[in-house]
C-alpha cells in the first residue's frame, strides 16, 4: 500500500511539473525572425546619402532583380531566392518597354554596398534599373493544450500540439541606378497558420517559411503591376521629373511613343492622299 501511494505521489508530482512547464511555455512562446532592408543596404551609416538626379530612361529598359543582403541567418537558400526572382521576372518579361530582366545572385551584393555596389552590378550586367527585394518574416510557435499528451513517445510523433504562425512581408523597390532615383515600390504580404508535432516542428516551420515567401511574392507581383501603371501615368503627368528617350530601332511605348505614333499616322495619311490624287 505504501509503495502504491509513493508511486501515485510521484506521478502526480511529475504531472504537476509538466503542466506548469507547459503553461509557462504557452505564455512565453517561441519564434524566429529573419529580415533584410533596402535602406540598410543602400544607405549604411558610413556612406554619405547621395542626392538623386533626374533619371534618363532609355527604352527599352534593361532591368535586374536581386535580394538585398540580410542582417542575420535566413531560411531562404540561394536556390529559393533565384526561384522567387524568376517568378517575379516572368511577369514583366512580356512588357514592351523592357528588353530583359537579369536575375542577380545574392553573392554579388555586399552588405552595406550601397550605390557603389549597384554601379558594379550595372557594369557587369549592362542594366539600367534594378528591383531590390527585401523581406521581413516572423514565425511564432505556441504549445497548445494538447502538449499534455506529449508524455508518451507516441504522442510526440502523432499529436499536433505546436501552433505556428508565419507572417511574411516582401518589398520591391525599383531604382534607376545612374540617377540614384527611386522609381516606385510595392509590398507583398502573407500569413500562414499551421500546426505540427514536436518531432516534425522544424520541418514544418521550414515549409511554412518557404510557402510564406511564395505567397508574399504572388501578392507582390499584383501590387507591382498596379504601381507600374501609376508610375507610367506619373511620367506622362510630370515630364520635368523624368527624361524618356528611345534606343536606336525601338518604336514602342513611353512618353515619346504617342508623338511617334502621330507622326507615323500623318505620314501614312499624306501618302494615301497623294495616291488618290494621282
Image: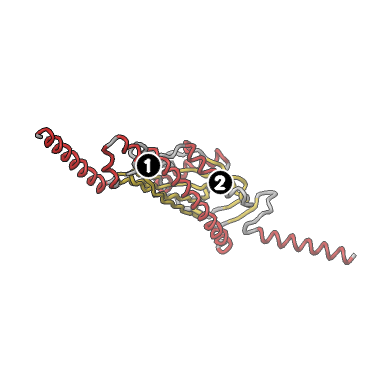
Closer to the camera, 278 or 164?
A: 164
Query: Residue 189: image x %, image y %?
Result: 44, 52
**Residue 43 appears in the rendering:** no
Look at mark 1 in the image and give the residue it sits on.
71
Q: Return the x and y of residue 15 as percentages of the image width and height.
A: 19, 41
Sort mark 1 into few (<14), some (14-19) or many (20+) by Cα contacts within 10 Å.
few
In the image: residue 111, left or right of residue 11: right
Position above or below: 254 against 200: below
Residue located 60% across and 45% down the image: 100
The quarter of the picture where residue 262 lies is bottom right
Q: Tag 1 or tag 2, which sits nearer the N-term? A: 1
Q: Can residue 21 be seen in this view?
A: yes
Q: Which of 208 and 50 is in front in this view?
A: 208
Q: Quadrant of the N terminus?
A: top left
Mark 2–mark 1 contact, CB under 8 Å?
Answer: no
x, y percentage for residue 41?
42, 44
Q: Helix or strand or loop: what does disc 2 sit on? A: helix
- Report the quarter where the C terminus lies: bottom right
Q: Distance between the residues labelled 2 and 1?
A: 25 Å
Circle 2 sits on which residue?
89
Q: Which residue is drawn at 80% across and 64% down?
A: 270
Farthest right residue in view? 278
> Within 10 Å of the Cα at label 2, are there few (<14), some (14-19), or many (20+) other Cα atoms?
many
Residue 90 location (% of width, % of height): 58, 46
Amino acid at each position: 500500500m505504501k509503495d502504491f501511494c509513493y508511486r501515485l505521489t510521484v506521478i502526480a508530482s511529475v504531472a504537476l511539473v509538466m503542466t506548469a512547464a507547459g503553461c509557462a511555455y504557452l505564455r512565453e512562446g517561441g519564434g524566429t525572425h529573419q529580415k533584410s532592408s533596402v535602406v540598410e543596404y543602400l544607405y549604411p551609416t558610413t556612406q554619405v546619402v547621395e542626392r538623386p538626379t533626374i533619371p534618363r530612361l532609355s527604352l527599352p529598359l534593361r532591368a535586374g532583380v536581386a535580394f538585398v543582403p540580410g542582417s542575420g541567418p535566413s531560411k531562404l537558400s540561394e536556390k529559393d531566392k533565384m526561384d522567387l526572382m524568376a517568378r517575379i521576372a516572368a511577369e514583366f518579361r512580356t512588357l514592351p518597354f523592357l528588353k530583359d530582366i537579369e536575375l542577380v545572385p545574392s553573392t554579388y551584393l555586399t552588405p552595406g554596398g550601397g550605390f557603389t555596389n549597384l554601379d558594379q552590378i550595372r557594369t557587369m550586367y549592362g542594366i539600367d534599373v534594378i528591383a531590390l527585394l527585401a523581406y521581413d518574416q516572423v514565425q511564432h510557435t505556441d504549445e497548445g493544450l494538447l502538449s499534455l499528451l506529449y508524455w508518451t513517445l507516441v504522442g510526440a510523433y502523432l499529436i499536433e500540439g505546436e501552433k505556428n504562425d508565419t507572417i511574411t512581408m516582401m518589398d520591391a523597390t525599383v531604382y534607376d541606378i545612374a540617377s540614384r532615383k527611386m522609381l516606385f515600390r510595392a509590398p507583398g504580404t502573407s500569413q500562414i497558420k499551421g500546426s505540427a508535432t514536436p518531432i516534425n516542428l522544424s520541418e514544418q516551420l521550414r515549409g511554412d517559411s518557404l510557402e510564406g515567401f511564395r505567397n508574399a511574392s504572388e501578392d507582390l507581383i499584383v501590387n507591382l503591376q498596379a504601381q507600374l501603371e501609376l508610375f507610367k501615368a506619373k511620367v506622362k503627368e510630370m515630364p520635368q521629373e523624368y527624361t524618356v528617350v528611345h534606343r536606336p530601332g525601338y518604336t514602342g511605348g513611353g512618353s515619346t511613343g504617342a508623338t511617334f505614333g502621330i507622326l507615323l499616322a500623318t505620314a501614312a495619311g499624306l501618302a494615301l492622299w497623294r495616291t488618290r490624287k494621282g
